[in-house]
Image: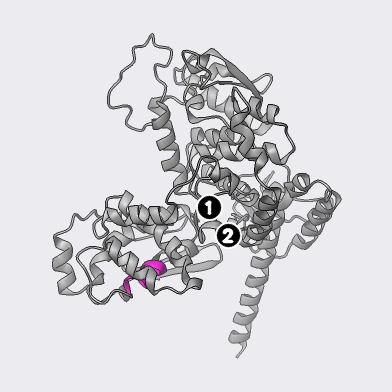
Amino acid sequence: MTQTAEVRSSTAVVVPLPERVITRSGSSFDPRKDLWEWADGPFNARIDFNRYSRGFEVFVLSLKQALLPFVKGHSSSHVGNLQAAFYHFVDTIPVCPEALGAQHISNYVATLDIHESWRVGTLNGLLQKWVELGLPGVEPECATYLLERKKPGNKKGEAVMTRNPVEGPLSEEEYTALYSAVNAAYGRGDLPLWTLLLTRLLLACGGRISQFASLKLCDFYSSTLALKLPQAKTGEKHARTSFLSFDISRQTGQLITEYKDGLQAEGYDDNSAFFPEDLVMPRGPRKQLRGSSDMFYGHCTPPTLSNWFRTLVRDIAPPTSRLDFAPMPLTPKRFRYTFGTRLAEEGASKVVIANRMGHVDLQQVEVYVAASPKIVENIDRTMGELLAPLAQAFKGKVVLDEQHSTHQGAPGSRIIDFRVSKDPVGSCAGKGKSCAFNKPVACYACFRFEPWLDAPHEKVLERLQSERERWAADERMAAVNDEPIRAVKEVIALCSQIWQQRTEQNSEAAT
């Protein structure tokens, strides 16, 4: 760092970097160094901050701070793209300013060709985080400018009608990628259980965040796997006056039962909030406005539950090609739009959609059934192949063989698909404990899976693709195994790459 940069940075509010940071893949490095290097599966990630010059070295510390949340929750390629976007941006500025403002971004946009417009979307993801964290170097007006430029405003219902990528319903591929990303983040310990459950319930019930803020532990029945969801906007005194029942899947029901048991062991009772404020809010509320006799004592307010949920899922949100591969924006309202849209796509009537979404009339559901099927078809077809490689369905680690696996042949660790071969396809780092998922189909998309390098993965792929063809008449059923299919393909590609690297290394050694 130059002397000029050192002087300038000394006047800024500097937040010290941690000594170590744990990446999404479980690697770690010292972010204080100007060269970041870490292993991301079979790949090596490298970001060199020494490339910044001409006085722009002063922005490096803040840039690192802004990148750290992405390092913890996203792929190394996404982190690299964010850093590259920032470098490309500042490289167009003739003289280093005291701080980056909206005019700098406007000038930058003017220099881009049409085919380079995607760079603004990537830069937006970084600068929004930069401003959100209150880091020096970027004026808050930058975030406002970018948001206004991306979405100056939507007419009522337009987000659903046009499948808006920021505020509208999730596409089928985004839905699958998000579901997988949240499951993996919870498994790694990056998300608390309540966040995983709220995600699943938002997708399964389509309720408003106020309905989930009103939910109590007694509203879930473990014996029947049914959830009574309090209704909102009914004209009643409060949300717990009327309820709508939803059937919950066995896997989610098992997680809810474990969640309830854990809370009750800590002293909560059936009348306690399903999402207690002292659980959701690490430091608790600033001021308790309710007495213990109040029906909603201990409940989060809807804005509080929404804000904490958005904060936690933001850092693990998978990228979407509909926003130039920036992380998909996630708000509770988007889950509701997705729920209504999927009901309409499945052929549900207006009456059914209104009932399941808690509407008192049919006026509000017109937007779901009126959305052009052609729009849906075009979006899914166009986005599917673009998003699939970024969804990173495979989240495990390829190992050479069983001897290199975590548990080396311990009971329950071998994964075998007898429908294709008696030979194992890999190992489970969790030894299969407390796993209710379909083996080995679900294994390929599980972060605990350790596929063996020389295993019959191609045969597993052939079987999955064959099953998909049998359901070709029902696209939703046919798509059930799409994520495992992508995961198996990724494993096959990784194995092929590793074999090629080993061959090249052996050739070099021989010469």
Q: CA distance from mark 2 to mark 1?
A: 8 Å
Task: Identify the image quadrant of the N terminus.
Answer: bottom left
Where does residue 133 sit, x and y in percent of width and height? 31, 50
User: Which residue is drawn at the image coordinates 63% and 76% (left, top)?
Assistant: 502
Dot 1: what SS?
loop
Q: Amino acid at mark 1?
A: Pro
- Residue count near mark 2 (Cα–Cα under 10 Å), binned few <14, some 14–19, many ≥20: some
Q: Does the magenta-highlighted stretch encompass residue 85?
A: yes
- Tell me if 198 is positioned left or right of 436 in this view: left
According to the picture, the residue beneath numbered tag 1 turns out to be: 318
Dot 2: what SS?
helix
Does 440 appear above or below 211? below
Quarter-of-image position of residue 498: bottom right
User: Which residue is drawn at the image coordinates 38% and 26% (left, top)?
Assistant: 278
- Tell me if 204 is positioned left or right of 315 in this view: right
Per the rendered image, the range of residues in magenta is 84-91
Q: Amino acid at mark 2?
A: Leu
According to the picture, the residue beneath numbered tag 2 turns out to be: 390
Q: Which mark is residue 110?
A: none
User: Which residue is drawn at the image coordinates 67% and 54% (left, top)?
Assistant: 380
Which is nearer the eye, 309 or 162?
A: 162
How many numbered callouts? Answer: 2
